[in-house]
Image (cartoon, rainbow, N blue to C red):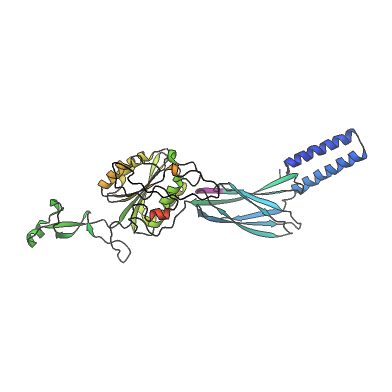
Amino acid sequence: MKFLAVPTKRGLLFLLLTLSALGVAFMNSGLITAFTASVLSALLLSSFLMTAFSLSGISVERSFPQEGHCGSDLFIELAVENRLPLFRQECIVFEDLPFLLSGQYAFAVPALSPREKRKFSFRVKAEKRGEYHLEKVFLCSGDPLGLFRKKKRFLLPAVLEIRPRIFPLRSLIRVNRHGGMPNAEGRALGHAGKGPEFFGVRPYRAGDEVRHIHWKSTAAKGKVMVKEFEAAAVDQIVILLDTEKKKVSPEPCDNNFEFLISCACSITQYLSGKYCHLLLIAADGEEVRFLSGDAASVNRPIRQVLTHLESSDQSFAKLLSTAAESIPPGSVVYLLSMSRESLPETIELLEERDSCCFWLYAPGENFPPIEPDKPRIVRREKLSDPFDDVSTIPHIADFTTKADEILEGGSRGESL
Protein backbone atom coordinates (compact mmCIF):
# COMPACT_ATOMS: atom_id res chain seq x y z
CA MET A 1 0.00 0.00 0.00
CA LYS A 2 1.14 3.51 -0.82
CA PHE A 3 0.72 4.93 2.69
CA LEU A 4 1.58 1.77 4.59
CA ALA A 5 3.50 2.36 7.80
CA VAL A 6 4.94 -0.78 9.39
CA PRO A 7 5.25 -0.95 13.19
CA THR A 8 8.68 -1.51 14.68
CA LYS A 9 9.31 -3.80 17.65
CA ARG A 10 8.89 -0.81 19.89
CA GLY A 11 5.72 0.07 18.01
CA LEU A 12 4.29 -3.42 18.54
CA LEU A 13 4.88 -3.16 22.27
CA PHE A 14 3.31 0.31 22.32
CA LEU A 15 0.33 -1.01 20.33
CA LEU A 16 -0.22 -3.81 22.85
CA LEU A 17 0.05 -1.29 25.68
CA THR A 18 -2.53 0.97 24.02
CA LEU A 19 -4.93 -1.91 23.43
CA SER A 20 -4.52 -2.99 27.03
CA ALA A 21 -5.25 0.56 28.26
CA LEU A 22 -8.35 0.74 26.05
CA GLY A 23 -9.54 -2.60 27.39
CA VAL A 24 -9.07 -1.49 30.99
CA ALA A 25 -10.85 1.82 30.30
CA PHE A 26 -13.75 -0.03 28.64
CA MET A 27 -14.12 -2.56 31.45
CA ASN A 28 -13.46 -0.17 34.34
CA SER A 29 -14.34 3.33 33.21
CA GLY A 30 -12.78 6.16 35.14
CA LEU A 31 -11.10 9.50 34.57
CA ILE A 32 -7.54 8.26 34.93
CA THR A 33 -7.97 5.10 32.84
CA ALA A 34 -9.84 7.00 30.12
CA PHE A 35 -7.20 9.76 30.05
CA THR A 36 -4.36 7.25 29.87
CA ALA A 37 -6.02 5.32 27.04
CA SER A 38 -6.74 8.55 25.15
CA VAL A 39 -3.15 9.78 25.41
CA LEU A 40 -1.70 6.45 24.26
CA SER A 41 -4.18 6.25 21.39
CA ALA A 42 -3.39 9.81 20.29
CA LEU A 43 0.36 9.14 20.33
CA LEU A 44 -0.12 5.92 18.37
CA LEU A 45 -2.38 7.55 15.77
CA SER A 46 -0.22 10.66 15.34
CA SER A 47 2.92 8.53 14.95
CA PHE A 48 1.19 6.40 12.33
CA LEU A 49 -0.02 9.41 10.32
CA MET A 50 3.35 11.18 10.57
CA THR A 51 5.13 8.08 9.24
CA ALA A 52 2.56 7.41 6.52
CA PHE A 53 3.03 10.87 4.98
CA SER A 54 6.71 11.38 5.87
CA LEU A 55 7.98 10.53 2.37
CA SER A 56 5.24 12.18 0.34
CA GLY A 57 6.54 14.63 -2.25
CA ILE A 58 10.17 13.43 -2.02
CA SER A 59 11.96 12.32 -5.19
CA VAL A 60 15.39 10.77 -5.72
CA GLU A 61 17.76 10.93 -8.69
CA ARG A 62 20.98 8.97 -9.01
CA SER A 63 24.00 8.94 -11.29
CA PHE A 64 26.41 6.04 -11.38
CA PRO A 65 29.70 5.47 -13.22
CA GLN A 66 29.37 2.90 -15.99
CA GLU A 67 32.49 0.96 -15.05
CA GLY A 68 35.15 0.56 -12.41
CA HIS A 69 37.84 -1.82 -11.21
CA CYS A 70 38.07 -4.05 -8.16
CA GLY A 71 39.77 -2.21 -5.35
CA SER A 72 39.03 1.20 -6.86
CA ASP A 73 36.73 3.86 -5.46
CA LEU A 74 33.38 4.57 -7.10
CA PHE A 75 31.54 7.84 -6.54
CA ILE A 76 27.76 7.67 -6.37
CA GLU A 77 25.85 10.92 -6.76
CA LEU A 78 22.32 11.28 -5.41
CA ALA A 79 19.90 14.19 -5.56
CA VAL A 80 17.01 14.25 -3.04
CA GLU A 81 14.27 16.82 -3.66
CA ASN A 82 11.36 17.96 -1.49
CA ARG A 83 8.66 19.03 -3.95
CA LEU A 84 6.11 20.11 -1.34
CA PRO A 85 5.81 23.53 0.40
CA LEU A 86 6.31 21.77 3.75
CA PHE A 87 9.30 20.81 5.83
CA ARG A 88 10.39 17.18 5.58
CA GLN A 89 12.05 15.33 8.42
CA GLU A 90 15.26 13.33 8.19
CA CYS A 91 15.22 10.06 6.28
CA ILE A 92 17.58 7.27 5.26
CA VAL A 93 18.65 6.38 1.71
CA PHE A 94 19.88 2.85 1.05
CA GLU A 95 20.50 0.58 -1.91
CA ASP A 96 21.59 -3.00 -2.49
CA LEU A 97 24.99 -3.11 -4.16
CA PRO A 98 26.07 -6.70 -4.87
CA PHE A 99 29.64 -5.68 -5.74
CA LEU A 100 30.20 -4.75 -2.06
CA LEU A 101 30.99 -7.37 0.57
CA SER A 102 28.42 -5.75 2.86
CA GLY A 103 25.89 -5.88 0.01
CA GLN A 104 24.37 -2.50 0.81
CA TYR A 105 25.12 1.16 1.49
CA ALA A 106 23.05 3.64 3.51
CA PHE A 107 23.33 7.27 4.64
CA ALA A 108 21.13 9.84 6.35
CA VAL A 109 19.47 12.73 4.49
CA PRO A 110 19.08 15.81 6.72
CA ALA A 111 15.73 17.58 7.12
CA LEU A 112 14.67 19.34 3.92
CA SER A 113 13.16 22.80 3.61
CA PRO A 114 10.15 23.45 1.32
CA ARG A 115 11.09 22.98 -2.34
CA GLU A 116 14.69 22.19 -1.39
CA LYS A 117 16.91 19.92 -3.48
CA ARG A 118 20.16 18.55 -2.09
CA LYS A 119 22.92 16.68 -3.87
CA PHE A 120 25.08 14.09 -2.17
CA SER A 121 28.25 12.39 -3.34
CA PHE A 122 29.73 9.47 -1.48
CA ARG A 123 32.41 6.92 -2.11
CA VAL A 124 32.28 3.13 -2.09
CA LYS A 125 35.00 0.63 -2.92
CA ALA A 126 34.27 -2.02 -5.54
CA GLU A 127 35.11 -5.44 -4.10
CA LYS A 128 33.60 -7.93 -6.57
CA ARG A 129 34.02 -8.05 -10.34
CA GLY A 130 31.20 -8.67 -12.78
CA GLU A 131 28.32 -6.89 -14.50
CA TYR A 132 25.59 -5.64 -12.19
CA HIS A 133 22.12 -4.39 -13.05
CA LEU A 134 21.00 -1.92 -10.41
CA GLU A 135 17.35 -0.93 -10.25
CA LYS A 136 15.99 0.14 -6.87
CA VAL A 137 16.86 2.90 -4.43
CA PHE A 138 14.94 3.04 -1.16
CA LEU A 139 14.01 5.87 1.21
CA CYS A 140 13.16 4.97 4.77
CA SER A 141 11.56 7.25 7.35
CA GLY A 142 9.61 7.04 10.60
CA ASP A 143 8.26 9.03 13.53
CA PRO A 144 10.14 10.67 16.40
CA LEU A 145 9.02 7.95 18.83
CA GLY A 146 10.28 5.19 16.57
CA LEU A 147 6.95 3.34 16.59
CA PHE A 148 6.51 3.03 12.81
CA ARG A 149 8.65 3.07 9.72
CA LYS A 150 7.91 3.47 6.03
CA LYS A 151 9.96 2.45 3.01
CA LYS A 152 9.51 3.99 -0.43
CA ARG A 153 10.98 2.48 -3.57
CA PHE A 154 12.38 4.39 -6.56
CA LEU A 155 13.15 2.63 -9.84
CA LEU A 156 16.46 4.01 -11.08
CA PRO A 157 17.97 1.41 -13.47
CA ALA A 158 21.69 1.44 -14.13
CA VAL A 159 24.27 -1.04 -15.46
CA LEU A 160 27.67 -1.15 -13.80
CA GLU A 161 30.66 -3.23 -14.89
CA ILE A 162 33.34 -3.96 -12.31
CA ARG A 163 36.49 -5.18 -14.02
CA PRO A 164 39.34 -7.13 -12.42
CA ARG A 165 41.98 -5.25 -10.53
CA ILE A 166 44.80 -4.05 -12.79
CA PHE A 167 48.31 -3.66 -11.43
CA PRO A 168 50.23 -0.96 -13.33
CA LEU A 169 53.34 -2.58 -14.79
CA ARG A 170 56.47 -0.72 -15.81
CA SER A 171 57.87 -3.75 -17.58
CA LEU A 172 57.20 -7.42 -18.13
CA ILE A 173 59.39 -10.48 -18.18
CA ARG A 174 60.78 -11.39 -21.57
CA VAL A 175 58.18 -9.52 -23.62
CA ASN A 176 60.68 -8.72 -26.39
CA ARG A 177 61.94 -12.29 -26.56
CA HIS A 178 63.13 -12.08 -30.15
CA GLY A 179 64.94 -8.80 -29.68
CA GLY A 180 63.78 -7.26 -32.98
CA MET A 181 64.32 -3.53 -33.54
CA PRO A 182 61.20 -1.42 -34.22
CA ASN A 183 60.66 0.23 -37.58
CA ALA A 184 59.22 3.70 -38.21
CA GLU A 185 55.71 2.42 -37.44
CA GLY A 186 56.79 0.85 -34.17
CA ARG A 187 56.69 -2.70 -35.51
CA ALA A 188 59.53 -5.14 -34.94
CA LEU A 189 61.90 -5.75 -37.85
CA GLY A 190 62.99 -9.22 -38.82
CA HIS A 191 66.37 -10.60 -37.81
CA ALA A 192 68.36 -13.77 -38.15
CA GLY A 193 67.15 -16.83 -36.32
CA LYS A 194 64.83 -19.80 -36.70
CA GLY A 195 61.83 -19.17 -38.89
CA PRO A 196 60.16 -20.04 -42.19
CA GLU A 197 61.53 -17.16 -44.32
CA PHE A 198 65.01 -17.03 -45.89
CA PHE A 199 67.18 -14.29 -44.34
CA GLY A 200 70.64 -14.69 -45.89
CA VAL A 201 73.84 -16.71 -45.78
CA ARG A 202 76.72 -16.73 -43.33
CA PRO A 203 79.87 -18.79 -42.67
CA TYR A 204 79.40 -22.19 -41.09
CA ARG A 205 79.53 -22.39 -37.28
CA ALA A 206 79.90 -25.49 -35.16
CA GLY A 207 76.49 -26.97 -34.49
CA ASP A 208 74.86 -25.86 -37.77
CA GLU A 209 72.85 -28.55 -39.53
CA VAL A 210 74.15 -30.00 -42.79
CA ARG A 211 70.77 -29.55 -44.47
CA HIS A 212 71.17 -25.75 -44.15
CA ILE A 213 74.41 -25.61 -46.20
CA HIS A 214 74.09 -23.17 -49.13
CA TRP A 215 76.04 -25.04 -51.81
CA LYS A 216 76.22 -22.25 -54.41
CA SER A 217 77.70 -19.75 -51.93
CA THR A 218 80.03 -22.46 -50.62
CA ALA A 219 81.38 -23.11 -54.13
CA ALA A 220 81.66 -19.39 -54.91
CA LYS A 221 83.47 -18.40 -51.71
CA GLY A 222 85.52 -21.52 -51.23
CA LYS A 223 84.31 -22.06 -47.68
CA VAL A 224 81.26 -23.62 -46.15
CA MET A 225 78.30 -21.23 -46.03
CA VAL A 226 74.94 -21.95 -44.45
CA LYS A 227 71.47 -20.52 -44.97
CA GLU A 228 70.02 -18.35 -42.24
CA PHE A 229 66.32 -17.84 -41.72
CA GLU A 230 64.36 -14.87 -40.44
CA ALA A 231 63.14 -15.23 -36.90
CA ALA A 232 59.55 -14.39 -36.20
CA ALA A 233 59.45 -10.63 -35.70
CA VAL A 234 56.27 -10.66 -33.60
CA ASP A 235 56.26 -12.13 -30.11
CA GLN A 236 53.65 -14.79 -29.47
CA ILE A 237 52.43 -14.35 -25.88
CA VAL A 238 50.17 -17.01 -24.34
CA ILE A 239 48.34 -16.77 -21.00
CA LEU A 240 47.13 -20.10 -19.61
CA LEU A 241 44.72 -19.40 -16.74
CA ASP A 242 43.71 -21.99 -14.15
CA THR A 243 40.00 -21.79 -13.20
CA GLU A 244 39.58 -25.08 -11.29
CA LYS A 245 36.89 -24.59 -8.64
CA LYS A 246 38.31 -27.14 -6.18
CA LYS A 247 41.56 -25.16 -5.90
CA VAL A 248 39.97 -21.79 -5.06
CA SER A 249 40.54 -20.58 -1.49
CA PRO A 250 37.42 -19.76 0.59
CA GLU A 251 38.07 -16.03 0.95
CA PRO A 252 35.23 -14.38 -1.07
CA CYS A 253 37.27 -11.68 -2.83
CA ASP A 254 40.93 -11.77 -1.87
CA ASN A 255 41.49 -15.35 -2.99
CA ASN A 256 43.97 -17.04 -5.30
CA PHE A 257 41.54 -17.24 -8.23
CA GLU A 258 40.82 -13.51 -8.19
CA PHE A 259 44.54 -12.87 -7.81
CA LEU A 260 45.36 -14.83 -10.97
CA ILE A 261 42.57 -13.10 -12.89
CA SER A 262 44.03 -9.74 -11.87
CA CYS A 263 47.47 -10.89 -13.03
CA ALA A 264 46.07 -12.03 -16.39
CA CYS A 265 44.25 -8.72 -16.82
CA SER A 266 47.40 -6.78 -15.87
CA ILE A 267 49.51 -8.67 -18.41
CA THR A 268 46.86 -8.08 -21.08
CA GLN A 269 46.66 -4.37 -20.32
CA TYR A 270 50.43 -3.98 -20.45
CA LEU A 271 50.75 -5.87 -23.73
CA SER A 272 48.03 -3.75 -25.35
CA GLY A 273 50.68 -1.05 -25.78
CA LYS A 274 53.14 -3.47 -27.41
CA TYR A 275 53.29 -4.94 -30.88
CA CYS A 276 52.74 -8.63 -30.24
CA HIS A 277 50.22 -11.44 -30.69
CA LEU A 278 48.30 -12.49 -27.59
CA LEU A 279 46.41 -15.70 -26.83
CA LEU A 280 44.33 -16.30 -23.68
CA ILE A 281 43.33 -19.88 -22.84
CA ALA A 282 40.98 -20.55 -19.92
CA ALA A 283 38.25 -23.03 -19.02
CA ASP A 284 34.80 -21.49 -18.83
CA GLY A 285 32.28 -24.05 -17.67
CA GLU A 286 32.50 -27.15 -19.85
CA GLU A 287 34.23 -25.39 -22.74
CA VAL A 288 37.67 -23.87 -23.19
CA ARG A 289 37.96 -20.24 -24.26
CA PHE A 290 40.54 -19.29 -26.89
CA LEU A 291 40.85 -15.54 -27.46
CA SER A 292 43.63 -14.50 -29.79
CA GLY A 293 44.70 -11.58 -31.92
CA ASP A 294 46.83 -8.48 -31.96
CA ALA A 295 47.37 -7.47 -28.32
CA ALA A 296 45.87 -4.02 -28.82
CA SER A 297 42.71 -5.25 -30.53
CA VAL A 298 42.11 -8.27 -28.29
CA ASN A 299 42.62 -6.33 -25.06
CA ARG A 300 38.97 -5.36 -24.62
CA PRO A 301 37.49 -8.82 -25.45
CA ILE A 302 39.88 -10.46 -22.99
CA ARG A 303 38.97 -7.96 -20.26
CA GLN A 304 35.29 -8.68 -20.91
CA VAL A 305 35.87 -12.42 -20.53
CA LEU A 306 37.96 -11.98 -17.39
CA THR A 307 35.27 -9.71 -15.90
CA HIS A 308 32.62 -12.42 -16.17
CA LEU A 309 34.79 -15.54 -15.83
CA GLU A 310 33.79 -17.91 -13.04
CA SER A 311 35.59 -20.90 -11.59
CA SER A 312 35.07 -24.16 -13.47
CA ASP A 313 34.80 -27.85 -12.68
CA GLN A 314 37.43 -28.51 -15.34
CA SER A 315 40.85 -29.33 -13.89
CA PHE A 316 43.99 -27.46 -14.84
CA ALA A 317 45.53 -30.76 -15.98
CA LYS A 318 42.73 -31.23 -18.49
CA LEU A 319 43.08 -27.63 -19.64
CA LEU A 320 46.81 -28.15 -20.23
CA SER A 321 46.24 -31.31 -22.26
CA THR A 322 43.63 -29.50 -24.37
CA ALA A 323 45.61 -26.32 -24.92
CA ALA A 324 49.20 -27.53 -25.25
CA GLU A 325 48.94 -28.43 -28.92
CA SER A 326 47.28 -25.08 -29.71
CA ILE A 327 50.22 -23.02 -28.46
CA PRO A 328 52.38 -21.80 -31.38
CA PRO A 329 56.05 -22.85 -31.31
CA GLY A 330 58.40 -20.19 -29.98
CA SER A 331 55.79 -18.60 -27.73
CA VAL A 332 56.28 -16.91 -24.38
CA VAL A 333 53.87 -18.77 -22.10
CA TYR A 334 52.59 -17.51 -18.74
CA LEU A 335 51.21 -20.39 -16.68
CA LEU A 336 48.90 -18.91 -14.04
CA SER A 337 47.97 -21.86 -11.87
CA MET A 338 46.52 -22.83 -8.51
CA SER A 339 47.99 -26.34 -8.70
CA ARG A 340 51.04 -28.20 -10.06
CA GLU A 341 49.22 -31.02 -11.84
CA SER A 342 50.66 -31.95 -15.25
CA LEU A 343 52.95 -28.91 -15.27
CA PRO A 344 56.25 -30.84 -15.69
CA GLU A 345 55.06 -32.72 -18.78
CA THR A 346 53.46 -29.63 -20.30
CA ILE A 347 56.51 -27.44 -19.76
CA GLU A 348 58.82 -30.07 -21.23
CA LEU A 349 56.57 -30.31 -24.27
CA LEU A 350 56.49 -26.53 -24.71
CA GLU A 351 60.24 -26.15 -24.27
CA GLU A 352 60.82 -28.85 -26.88
CA ARG A 353 58.85 -26.58 -29.23
CA ASP A 354 61.14 -23.64 -28.45
CA SER A 355 58.65 -21.94 -26.08
CA CYS A 356 59.71 -20.05 -22.98
CA CYS A 357 57.54 -20.74 -19.90
CA PHE A 358 56.96 -18.60 -16.84
CA TRP A 359 54.99 -19.99 -13.94
CA LEU A 360 52.96 -18.01 -11.42
CA TYR A 361 51.79 -20.34 -8.66
CA ALA A 362 49.03 -19.28 -6.25
CA PRO A 363 48.03 -22.22 -4.01
CA GLY A 364 44.90 -21.88 -1.90
CA GLU A 365 46.73 -22.45 1.39
CA ASN A 366 48.65 -19.23 0.85
CA PHE A 367 45.41 -17.27 0.64
CA PRO A 368 43.69 -17.91 4.00
CA PRO A 369 40.70 -15.84 5.15
CA ILE A 370 41.69 -12.43 6.45
CA GLU A 371 40.05 -10.24 9.03
CA PRO A 372 38.16 -7.13 7.83
CA ASP A 373 40.20 -3.92 7.60
CA LYS A 374 43.47 -5.85 8.02
CA PRO A 375 45.80 -6.12 5.02
CA ARG A 376 47.14 -9.49 4.00
CA ILE A 377 50.70 -10.14 5.16
CA VAL A 378 52.94 -10.25 2.12
CA ARG A 379 55.10 -13.35 2.15
CA ARG A 380 57.61 -13.91 -0.63
CA GLU A 381 59.11 -17.33 -1.11
CA LYS A 382 61.44 -18.89 -3.60
CA LEU A 383 61.02 -22.53 -4.54
CA SER A 384 64.41 -24.12 -5.12
CA ASP A 385 63.31 -26.89 -7.48
CA PRO A 386 59.55 -27.32 -7.48
CA PHE A 387 59.77 -30.44 -9.67
CA ASP A 388 62.33 -33.19 -9.46
CA ASP A 389 62.21 -33.91 -13.17
CA VAL A 390 62.05 -30.28 -14.33
CA SER A 391 64.61 -28.19 -12.49
CA THR A 392 64.95 -25.26 -14.85
CA ILE A 393 61.44 -23.77 -14.79
CA PRO A 394 61.87 -19.97 -14.63
CA HIS A 395 58.85 -19.61 -12.33
CA ILE A 396 57.94 -16.09 -11.29
CA ALA A 397 56.81 -16.49 -7.69
CA ASP A 398 54.63 -18.74 -5.60
CA PHE A 399 52.83 -16.09 -3.54
CA THR A 400 52.57 -12.35 -3.06
CA THR A 401 49.85 -9.75 -3.28
CA LYS A 402 52.08 -7.31 -5.15
CA ALA A 403 51.62 -8.52 -8.69
CA ASP A 404 53.48 -5.55 -10.11
CA GLU A 405 56.62 -6.84 -8.36
CA ILE A 406 56.00 -10.41 -9.48
CA LEU A 407 55.47 -9.65 -13.11
CA GLU A 408 58.44 -7.31 -13.29
CA GLY A 409 61.04 -9.74 -12.06
CA GLY A 410 59.97 -12.38 -9.61
CA SER A 411 62.25 -14.95 -8.17
CA ARG A 412 64.05 -16.21 -11.26
CA GLY A 413 62.84 -13.99 -14.07
CA GLU A 414 64.53 -11.29 -16.06
CA SER A 415 62.90 -7.88 -16.37
CA LEU A 416 63.20 -5.92 -19.59
Specify whether residue 400 is painted magenta: no
Q: Is residue 346 above or below residue 57?
A: above
Report the predominant secondary structure element of the magenta stretch: strand
Q: Splitting the image into 4 quarters, where does residue 341 fall? A: top left
Work out whether residue 398 can be spotted. yes
Q: Residue at x 17, y 60 (%)?
A: 200
Magenta span of residues: 128-133
The percent coordinates of residue 215 (x first, y second) are 9, 56
The percent coordinates of residue 188 (x first, y second) are 29, 61
Residue 165 is left or right of residue 232, and the answer is right
Specify whether residue 131 is painted magenta: yes
Q: Quadrant of the N terminus?
A: top right
Q: Residue at x 12, y 56 (%)?
A: 214
Q: Residue at x 83, y 44 (%)?
A: 42
Q: Quadrant of the C terminus?
A: bottom left
The percent coordinates of residue 401 (x first, y second) are 45, 51
The one of 296 and 400 positioned closer to us in this rendering: 400
Residue 238 is left or right of residue 106, and the answer is left
Work out whether residue 299 can be spotted. no
Q: Which residue of the protein is positioned furthest toward the top in this rendering?
A: 27
